Image: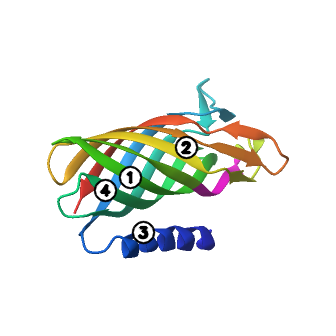
């Protein structure tokens, strides 16, 4: 995982180095996502069942954005943690990955921008503990590079709300494949 994170940081740094002087700002964001395939179902004693999906559920990230002064274009790089989890007092099951994204944005209106770019979900894995081992086995997954489309409305220079679509694929050690396509709503704070 360290090599994927270092590669992502190197990519962001290289993009910034090529960009010459401009405006840098950091950001943090949190998204709720849904979609993908059901990797496993976790039943509870009360009859409820929770699906662990390849496109869910919470995605937190942080990164940097660079914009040439006066330009309608911006370049954004980020590292994140994306997880879908079910837990109880006697065990848990979770699907987690560490996405690295590089997106380009274009201002289409004063407070609205559209973006597109690439995503790689590093260190994707399905993990279970305790009673969760009845419903899932610990597995490492490999991810193919994905594509991101995003529209963001900026309420102010510091706060934004995005709608995003991601297309990505995963493969288990046994060569079984899972569709990780998902939609999400993200809230971001820029500093």
Q: Position of residue 188 (x, y in %)?
A: 29, 50
Nearest to N terminus: mark 1 or mark 2: 2
In the image, taking residue 76 as reference, residue 52 lies left or right, namely right
Q: Are marks 1 and 4 in contact (CB under 8 Å)?
A: yes
4 vs 2, front mark: 4
Nearest to N terminus: mark 1 or mark 4: 4
Q: Position of residue 176 (x, y in %)?
A: 80, 41
Q: Mark 3 points at which residue?
A: 15
Distance of mark 1 from mark 2, alpha carbons? Answer: 27 Å
Q: Name the residue under label 2.
A: 84
In the image, taking residue 49 as reference, residue 133 lies left or right, namely right
Q: Position of residue 96 (x, y in %)?
A: 59, 52
Q: Name the residue under label 4.
A: 74
Nearest to N terminus: mark 4 or mark 2: 4
Work out whether 172 lies above or below 77: above
Distance of mark 1 from mark 4, alpha carbons? Answer: 6 Å
Distance of mark 2 from mark 3, alpha carbons? Answer: 31 Å
In terms of secondary structure, where does tag 2 sit? strand
Work out whether 64 lies above or below 38: below
Q: Where is residue 122 in the image (x, y as percent from the top left)?
A: 61, 59
Image quarter hosting the C terminus: bottom left
Most extreme residue toward the top is: 47
Magenta segment, which residues? 121-130
In the image, taking residue 1 as reference, residue 174 lies left or right, namely right
Q: Are marks 4 and 2 in contact (CB under 8 Å)?
A: no
Q: Residues within 10 Å of mark 4 (few under 14, many from 20)?
A: some
1 vs 2, front mark: 1
Nearest to N terminus: mark 2 or mark 3: 3
Quarter of the image for residue 54 reads top right
In terms of secondary structure, where does tag 4 sit? strand
2 vs 3, front mark: 3
């Amino acid at each position: 995982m360290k090599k994927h994170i270092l590669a992502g940081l190197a990519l962001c740094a290289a993009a910034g180095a090529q960009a010459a002087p401009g405006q840098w700002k950091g950001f943090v964001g949190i998204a709720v996502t849904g979609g993908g395939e059901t990797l496993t179902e976790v039943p509870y004693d009360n009859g409820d069942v929770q699906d662990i999906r390849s496109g869910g559920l919470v995605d937190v990230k942080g990164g940097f954005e660079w914009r040439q002064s006066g330009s309608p274009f911006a370049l954004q790089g980020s590292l994140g943690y994306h997880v879908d989890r079910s837990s109880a007092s006697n065990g848990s099951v979770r699907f987690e990955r560490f996405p690295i994204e590089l997106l380009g944005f274009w201002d289409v209106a004063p407070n609205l921008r559209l973006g597109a770019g690439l995503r790689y979900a590093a260190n994707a894995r399905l993990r279970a503990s305790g009673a969760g081992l009845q419903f899932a086995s610990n597995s490492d997954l490999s991810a193919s590079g994905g594509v991101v489309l995003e529209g963001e409305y900026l309420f102010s220079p510091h706060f934004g709300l995005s709608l995003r679509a991601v297309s990505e694929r995963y493969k288990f050690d046994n060569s079984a494949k899972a569709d990780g396509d998902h939609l999400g709503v993200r809230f971001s704070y820029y500093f």
